[in-house]
Amino acid sequence: MTLSTFKSVLFSVLFLAISTTGFALENKESGEDEKFDPKEMILHHVKDAHGFHLWGEGHDAVSIPLPVILWTDNGLTTFMSSAFHHDDSGKEIVSANGGKFVKVHEKIYQLNDDATAVTFDEEHHPTNAVKPLNFSITRNVLMLFVSALLLIVLFVSAARSYAKSKDGVPTGLAGFLEPLVVFVRDEIARPMIGEHKYKKYMPYLLTIFFFIWINNIFGLIPILNGANLSGNIAFTATLAIFTFIITTLSGNANYWKHIFWMPGVPVPMKIFLMPIEIIGMFVKPISLMIRLFANITAGHVIILALMSLIFVFKTVAIAPVSVGFSLFITVIEIIVTAIQAYIFTILSALYFGMATEEAHH
Amino acid sequence: MTITGIAAVGAGLAAIGAGLGIGKIGGSAMEAMARQPEMHGKIQSSALILAAFVEAVALFGVVVAFLQG
Amino acid sequence: MDLITPGIGLVFWTAVTFLILLFILRKFAWKPILGAVSDREEGIKDALASAEKARLEMQNLQADNERILKEARVERETMLKEAREIKAKMIADAKEEAQAQASKMIEQAQTAIESEKKSAMAELKNHVAGLSVEIAEKVVRDELSNKDKQLKLVETMLGEATLN
């Protein structure tokens, strides 16, 4: 039963992915008379945005506005992203809370007090504006909330169903989710951390595994218009920092001894190893961050680049090739969503295991 | 050649290195699995972890390319 | 460059959301799910252990039964043997007693016969004596008239008497 459900879910995700990638591109292309720039298009899809763009271009565009929350010198400033009227070049100036704001390339700038229009240097960076602290509910932040809510609904209802069934046998949703939970416990936590200590880390590992996985999957559904959360370095950096904090806090004497005074090697070697180990301590979370970010972003870039071929060559003849290839990459990406969540979780577990390992020599 | 072009070549070189590394891991894992089919699960998960480590190096290259992009 | 500079807003929201998510899921999802799974695993382990125990008990019981059966069989054997022996002895005893009784009775009968015979002989003798006397009287009376005859008779009779 679970296998067939899984298959049908897989196929519907695939279908959505194929059908809407092309759709999204079509929107982008129409109405643009100037030369099609694939790099611009790809970066626009991979990056974060204020507002959920649905269809149309310029002033005709239809999008879901999202709140903009800024921390300026005058305190908290909030307004809806629709106030910019789909302008992304800094022409539309919004006045709120005594400040003047413009949006350039999905970044919000505050104009200096004496300026009336934004001016740019040759690299297209505004010269007379500063970037306030931006806590806006962007596309990615919205997806972050949606995915967290979905996880809560899924797992809390699954957990409830255990209380209902008298003999503790999983039914329905719990029957589908339980093997995944048991997988995290038996294949990740137990072998990497050890039988006696793994229980303490289970909530973190489970949460991180499902959180990354569901956001990887969301990133693959282009109807969400490239809500590329797990391909955003801020997201992966935050999770990597959590892993780093937990590793550092749970490090025992043995762990610190291995870093500062490696046992079992001659003294010159100990001195030589110490800086390497200290760098290694920080490289571990950095590599976690880069790995997830680059994997997911690279997948998106490849799919979008293959689709761009149609518009670069300006012919329909190339369409079967690029659709075929992007189908192939999408299938691989579906596997990668699970693998990257698994890798992030298992490496976190590995680091926790290293931090809590007892001396055995 | 522009700096972006050089960055692209760098990313390609990093991909070659990672390709070789992951290929070696995959080949050895396959061989090990064929030799000891009962260790299949353990070999597979350690091969995945090792591939992730190798891949990270290539991804550093890709990120440096992004820096120029 | 833009792509790999983390935005402070997203970092903030990710941290907040993740911590809340971790807290809620830990309390309302992971604890009950992991609890249910480990409870079930414990249950299965217990059930297997008790099944094994029951199997061992069963085996013990069977062994016990067999032992008791064996003992019972041995006991029956000995009882049967004893009974057989008793039977044989009883038969032998009865035979012996019967023989003794019989021989005793025969003896008694013999003695009785002997005494009867003796008494019968004695009576017969008496009878014969009386009869002889009577006959003698009659003969004497008859013969006494004739002297010769008398003598001859006495002689004959005497001779006969001594022969007897």
Image: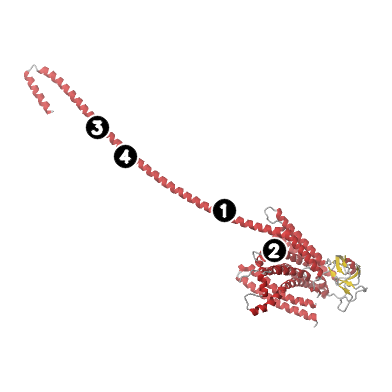
Which residue is at the front of the view, B10 or C53? C53
What's the residue at 70%, 53% (across, down)?
A: A165
Kindly report which numbered mark, 4 or 1, lies closer to the viewer in this rendering: 1
Verify CB contact (< 8 Å) between mark 3 and mark 4. Answer: no
Q: Quadrant of residue A6?
A: bottom right
- The subunit letter for the residue under badge 2 reads A
Give the Cα separation between the discs numbered 2 and 4: 97 Å
Where disc 4 sits, the SS reads helix
Give the Cα separation between the discs numbered 3 and 1: 83 Å
Give the Cα separation between the discs numbered 1 and 2: 36 Å
Tag on residue C54? Answer: 1
Kindly identify the amino acid type of the residue bearing the numbered disc 1. Ala
Give the Cα separation between the discs numbered 4 and 1: 62 Å
Tag on residue C96? Answer: 4
Tell me if mark 4 has few (under 14), some (14-19) or many (20+) residues whose alpha carbon lies within 10 angstroms of its own. few
- The subunit letter for the residue under badge 4 reads C
Which residue is at the front of the view, C15 or A222? C15
Q: Quadrant of residue C150?
A: top left
Does residue B20 appear in this view? no
Kindly identify the amino acid type of the residue bearing the numbered disc 2. Met
Residue at image mark 2: A202
Residue A334 located left or right of residue A313: left
Tag on residue C111? Answer: 3
Mark 3 or mark 1: name the one nearer the start of the chain.
1
Where disc 2 sits, the SS reads helix
Which residue is at the front of the view, B62 or A248? A248
